[in-house]
Amino acid sequence: MSNLTAFLAQNALKVETQEHVVSKRFVDPDTKEAMKWQVGAVSSDRDEALRKQHTKRLPVPGKKNVFQPTTDYDGYLASLAVECTVFPDLNSTELQNSYGVMGAEALLKQMLLPGEYAEYLKIVQNANGFDVGMDEAVEEAKN
């Protein structure tokens, strides 16, 4: 028979906070090394809430009282990135003021170059278990 104790909450492996160099432009003044950002994961409930926050119901043209849910994935990923960023504190007023922006999402986009931002979104998705690409899934299914 199977052993269900492996699935108990106290036996599940804890998700560790990951450290990544997101941009070589942020350098520690003491060590002269690139600063590492800390990235954590969110719960499935929180992820669902973020998705719902960025989903709108749009009317279907030509069909009365029929709506189609549409998700703003750019907005969702920006919110997920902010939610998962442990360090630096994107909600810091001092940090936001230094970039002349208000809000953590605006700060993140202002801090990073477009390529750095795209890479960071990949890091955040990987930290949350969205790291199996379609090519990998197909290859795994073949084996």
Image (cartoon, rainbow, N blue to C red):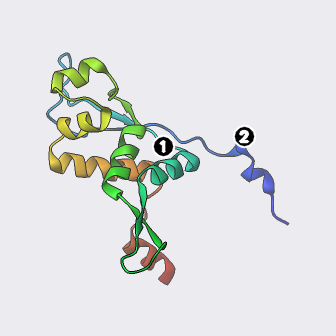
Left or right: residue 100 compared with residue 56: left
Mark 2 residue crowding within 10 angstroms, few (<14) / some (14–19) / many (20+): few
Q: Name the amino acid type tagged 2.
A: Gln
Of the residues tagged 2 and 1, which is closer to the observer? 1
- Disc 1 is placed on an element classified as loop
Left or right: residue 52 compared with residue 105: right
At horizontal 52% and vertical 48% (from top left) the residue drawn is 49
Front residue (pair 8, 51)? 51
Give the percent coordinates (x, y) of residue 143. 50, 81
At horizontal 40% and vertical 69% (from top left) the residue drawn is 59
Where is 41 relative to 68, above or below? above
User: Is residue 32 something one can see in this rendering?
Assistant: no
Where is 138 relative to 101, above or below? below
Front residue (pair 10, 62)? 62
All told, the count of numbered labels is 2
Mark 1 residue crowding within 10 angstroms, few (<14) / some (14–19) / many (20+): many
Where is 35 relative to 105, above or below? above
Between disc 2 and disc 1, whose residue precedes? 2
At horizontal 34% and vertical 26% (from top left) the residue drawn is 91
Furthest toward the front, the residue is 64
For mark 2, what is the residue? Answer: 10
Q: Name the amino acid type tagged 1.
A: Ala
Disc number placed over residue 41 in the picture, else none: 1
Give the percent coordinates (x, y) of residue 26. 18, 29
